[in-house]
Image: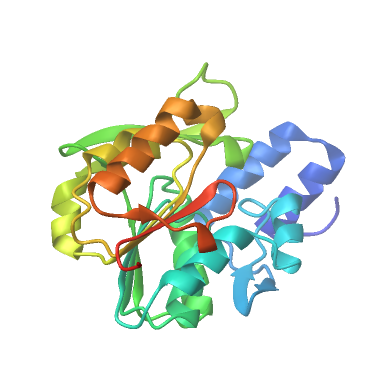
Amino acid sequence: MTGQMRPVEVVIFARKTGNLILERYSMAFQHKFNDTSAPFIASRGILLPDNPVFLDWRTRRALTEDAYEAKECLAVLKLIKPGDVVMELGAGIGYISTLIAKQTKAERVHSFEANTDLIPYIKKVHQANNVQNATVENAVLGVGNAITTFYVRRNFLSSSLDPMDGSGVVCEHSVPILDINETLKRIAPSVLVCDIEGGEVELIPKMDLSSLRAVVIELHPKLIRKHGVKRIFDAMHAAGLVYFPRWSDAKVVCFRRDWQ
């Protein structure tokens, strides 16, 4: 490695050479200084900064092939109507919120993401695509208001609220827990989009779903099992939101109030 390298280049070099210590410190450096020198990846008309801290090779490939979150993309594009207010739980890299903001006639998109390190990246995705009607908050939705810990791991995709055994943890962030029903009252969404890696099984049954016209959820049956899937379907049906098979596909399930 010769000459002066940008943080994003150091991460790439570290991964190619298998230098895990260099990769960890270069990732932390890039997090701190928020390097903006990377080029963009185009996917479904959306531009995403090509930052290897957040986009591994599998994600890059899926993005370039327009295969990233393909089932969820189809569902939101079909379900969202002009004037809808969308609440997204689990913003990820900002892809779905940008797709909704740019390619539907939703009035607003309110996204929530637990991973503090993703927030600047999501905002850059919104900025790169001139998104004016989407916001993102660094928060976990739950019952009551409190503080929890988010664990960022060297394998970024393994970062979560679960401390597990502490292995691979690069850093920890204190993240606010916002009361889900107070937040629903504040936003008054008509559509819910949810992908929270199994957290849906505890959260959905506690939500006041009365304002919602439609819901798109990515289920995680390996984590929530059969009884968890049943709890979510029961909560939806009890609220008058009926399973809509036409735009559901495997683990991505849709519910609608407004169909016969």
- Which one is in front, 87 or 166? 87
Residue 47 position within the rendered picture, expressed as x and y whole percent measured from the top left: 61, 75
Residue 76 position within the rendered picture, expressed as x and y whole percent measured from the top left: 47, 67
The residue at the point 59 percent across, 76 percent down is 46
Q: Is residue 130 above or below residue 213?
A: below
The residue at the point 62 percent across, 80 percent down is 45
- Which one is in front, 69 or 212? 212
Residue 178 position within the rendered picture, expressed as x and y whole percent measured from the top left: 21, 45
Q: For the view shown, which residue lies furthest in the front direction?
A: 260
Tell me if residue 142 can be seen. Answer: yes
Residue 107 position within the rendered picture, expressed as x and y whole percent measured from the top left: 31, 80
The residue at the point 59 percent across, 48 percent down is 250
Q: Is residue 22 above or below residue 222?
A: below
In the image: residue 16, left or right of residue 33: right
Q: Quadrant of residue 242?
A: bottom left
Which quarter of the rendered picture does the C terminus lie within? bottom left
Tell me if residue 95 can be seen. Answer: no
Colour scheme shown: rainbow
